[in-house]
Amino acid sequence: MHEFSLAQGLFTQLFRLAEQHRAEKIIIVRVEIGQFAGIVIDSFSFAFEILARERKLTREAVLEITEIKPLCGCLDCGHTVPADDSVPAVCAQCGSSRLTLSAADDLILTQVEME
């Protein structure tokens, strides 16, 4: 289960941030996970809960996850649209067929609330 190792990486970041800011407690951790990241959100949340219990700093931390839908962007004009169920064949703005997906496979720490 790679979600556990991803959660461990997140905790490494959290501990560094807490040390930099001399925090004694992490309250809320907000992350964004791309729809195509290959991460099972329930497994990632479970791993977070297990790891959070191990240290006083994170024992009461709450994880908030936002699942991000991919964007389809035109490489020629920069126009972007949500790529809900399919990727368009051409850009609606300029007609280019040079399209790319973004935000589809990301795991991003967006905010940490600490005391």
Image (spheres, rainbow, N blue to C red):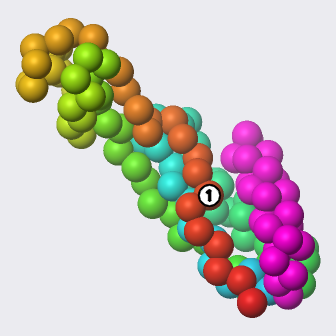
Q: Main secondary structure of the magenta part?
A: helix
Q: Residue at x 63, y 62 (%)?
A: 45
Magenta region = 1-24
Residue 106 in picture, x, y percent from top left: 54, 41
Q: Residue at x 37, y 27 (%)?
A: 101
Farthest front residue? 77
Q: Residue at x 31, y 36 (%)?
A: 71
- Check the picture and name the quadrant holding the C terminus: bottom right
Residue type highlighted by circle 1:
Leu
Residue 21 in picture, x, y percent from top left: 81, 77
Q: Residue at x 82, y 83 (%)?
A: 23
One can see residue 42 in this view: no
Considering only vertical position in the picture, is 97 above or below 1?
above
Q: Quadrant of residue 55?
A: bottom right
- Please say whether residue 62 is one of the residues in the magenta stretch: no
For the residue pair 84 and 115, the one nearer the viewer reads as 115
Farthest top residue? 97
Considering only vertical position in the picture, is 68 above or below 48?
above
Residue 80 in picture, x, y percent from top left: 24, 34
- Please say whether residue 20 is one of the residues in the magenta stretch: yes
One can see residue 75 in this view: yes
Residue 69 in picture, x, y percent from top left: 35, 44
Compared across the picture, whether 37 is left or right of 70 comes to right
Q: Quadrant of residue 1?
A: top right
Considering only vertical position in the picture, is 71 above or below 107?
above
Instruction: Look at mark 1 in the image and give the residue it sits on.
Output: 109
Compared across the picture, whether 59 is left or right of 107 comes to right
Compared across the picture, whether 43 is left or right of 16 comes to left
